[in-house]
Each structure stands twice: as structure tokens, then as C-alpha cells.
Image (cartoon, rainbow, N blue to C red):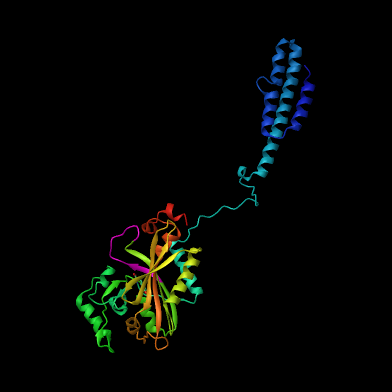
Amino acid sequence: MNLEEIKNRAKEEIEKIVDLKQADDFFKKYLGKKGEIAKVFDSLKDLAIEEKKSIGQQANTLKKEIEEFFNTKNEEIKNAKNQTNPNHTAEKIDITRPGQKIQRGHLHPLTLVMNEACSIFQTMGFEIAQGPELETEWYNFDALNVPKDHPARDMQDTFWLRQNVSEIKNQKSKIKDNEDGFYKSNRLLMRTQTSPVQIRYMESHQPPLRIIAPGRVFRNEATDAKHGAQFYQLEGLMVDKEVAASNFKAIIEDFLKRFFKTNVEMRLRPGFFPFTEPSFEIDVKRPDGKWMEIMGAGMVHPNVFRSAGLNASVKPGLGWQGFAFGVGIDRLAIVKYKITDIRLLYQNDLRFLNQF
Ligand code: DAH
């Protein structure tokens, strides 16, 4: 039994060890239950008393030395590992690791569409105008040439505000329209369309003008996949001495091309709106091949100009002419993002919203 030889071998081997697995094997080989040291102790029983004593002592020393080899190596490997993998220690920072992303919110698809639509029209020289969501009957209907008892008023079911009659009467007399000698109805409602902004803007600005009016509108009606009781519109109005339907068509074609980023197919159908003559409805082809109505439009009716105190003309150069349109922002969104149901836009389900 050559203890010196065991020690030299162990020393040689330990120096070549580079990982914890090898260190573990080393431990088993020398210090394990059936390892070299155990064998030495085993063999003591065959020796004479004297020898047993001295060799036993030497074996104990050897065991300690080999344990020392093992412990030192083990520490060394662990420290080396910590330096390359900072997860193993709180103190070491690896500045080359990618940072941790902070969870942030993002814009709602309707906001994205609204922003995009506004900026496209702004590049074409349209300015943004705004009006109140709580509107008067005058701006929402009368001024827009929607006759009092005309079924057109029923086209858009209205949320009226509860007001007492005397209140309405008082307000009415205050805003008596002197020129025509009739009263502008001050009955309050939630605007059913963004079109009243046309009147408000023209009252305070002289043409030529180009505006868009983005905003929320309200309808007292049942909801389904294509209709909501509350939705968003973007109104457009261009007024100048000579404005034709062809100008409208060119602008809308350009808008749709830029908004959908492809040559989306569109079609112009004759329609009816009291505030335009002639009136159109514009459809675009959805990815599934079906036509979807996205806006109403037309040439501004002379009565609308009159409501705002402007001179109208059907002949170029003699008064103001213009086109107007009202595009459904929700409709644009469902076509652009291939959404099947408009109501998804209002349910705030994160599984839906996180896709944008
Ligand atoms: N206000 C109409 C609606 O809500 C849409 C509309 C149609 C707006 C024709 C217009 C227009 O400006 O000229 O259904």
C-alpha cells in the first residue's frame, strides 16, 4: 500500500479537473464509500497493531489532504461559474445582458385608425375641427336641412336629453335668429353624427376651407356586428369657389389607397342625405370579397351653406360650393384589421387588444 503514490496520483488528477461533474467523480474515486481511502482503511485490519497505528495515522492525514484538494477545486469551479453566470450571485452584474422590457400599454385600434386617417387628410391640407358631443337639435338636424317631421330624422335614432319645457323655451327665445325670424331649437341631444361640426366651423370661418372633424357619435339603436350605439366618425368638408364631385372622388381614392396601403377597390353609389345634393355612399371591398359601406358623402346642399350664413351657388364662381363626407372609423378598422364584429372594439378584452 503506497500512500505517497495515491497522493501523487490524486494531486495530478485534481489539477486537470475543470467542472463539477469531474470533481464529483474525483470525490467518489478517492473519498467515496468504496474509494481509494476507504480501501486503505479496509486493509488496516490485516496488519499488526504497530503498523495499524502508524499507517492508520498516515491514512488519516492523506484523507484530509485529498479532502483539501477536492474542496479547493470545488470552490474554484463554482467561483469561475459565478463570474460568467450572474444568476448565481446577487453581487455580480453582467452589463452585456439584454435589459428587461417594461410592460407598457399601447394605443387602441380605433385610436390607431383615427390617428392614421387624420394624418393622411392633414397632408392634403385639411385642418382638424371639433364640436361638442352634447349638441342642440339645431346643429344636429335643422341646420343640416333635415326637415322637422321628415322621416330622414328617423334614419338616426336619437338619444334626447330630458329637459323641462320652460327651460327649452327660455333658451329658444335667447337664440332667436333675427334674419329669418324663426327659432333655432335648443333641445339637447347626443349628436348622432359629426356633421354639425360643418355648421359650427362655417359660422366662424370664411371659406375657402378644408376641415376634418373626428369624433364620437351616438345612436339609440340595437347593436349588432356592424352597428354600435356609440361609434366614431370622421367628418370632412371642403368649400371653395369651384369644387366638384370629381375632386371628392380623387381625394377619397387617394385617402383609401394610403390608408389601406393597397389599391383597395371602391365604389360610389347614389345615396340620400338631406345635407347633400347629390349624395353618395362609398363602399370598399373587404378581404373576403364582400362590399362594405364605409362613408356617406355628397355636394353640400345650398341650405346648409345658408344655415351657416354663407352664400351658396350651384354655378361655379358665383358663391360657395363644396363636398362633405362622413366616414365610419369603426368600419375602416374592421376592414383594415379583418375584424368580424364591431363590438369587439368596445369590450376591452386584452386577448383581442394585444393583437394591435
Ligand atoms: N352624417 C352621415 C351619417 O352619419 C354621414 C354623412 C353623409 C356625412 C353625407 C356627410 C355627408 O358629410 O355629406 O350617416
Q: Which residues are magenta?
A: 214-226
Residue 22 at x, y = what percent? 69, 30
Image coordinates of residue 250 in percent, x first then y, are 47, 73
Residue 171 visible to an observer of this rendering: yes
Residue 194 visible from this viewpoint? no
Q: Name which residue lies at 49% across and 74% down.
A: 122
- List x then y, in percent, for residue 277: 34, 77
Relative side of 161 to 336, left or right: left
Q: Quadrant of residue 312?
A: bottom left
Residue at image position (26%, 76%) is 187
Q: Residue 68's quadrant in the figure?
A: top right
Instruction: Please state if 101 lies on the left or on the right of 40 as rendered.
Output: left
Q: Nearer the viewer, residue 158 or 334?
A: 334
In magenta stretch: residue 219: yes
Give the quarter of the image for residue 297. bottom left
- Name which residue lies at 45% across and 71% down: 252
Which of 259 and 64 lies nearest the eye of the viewer?
A: 259
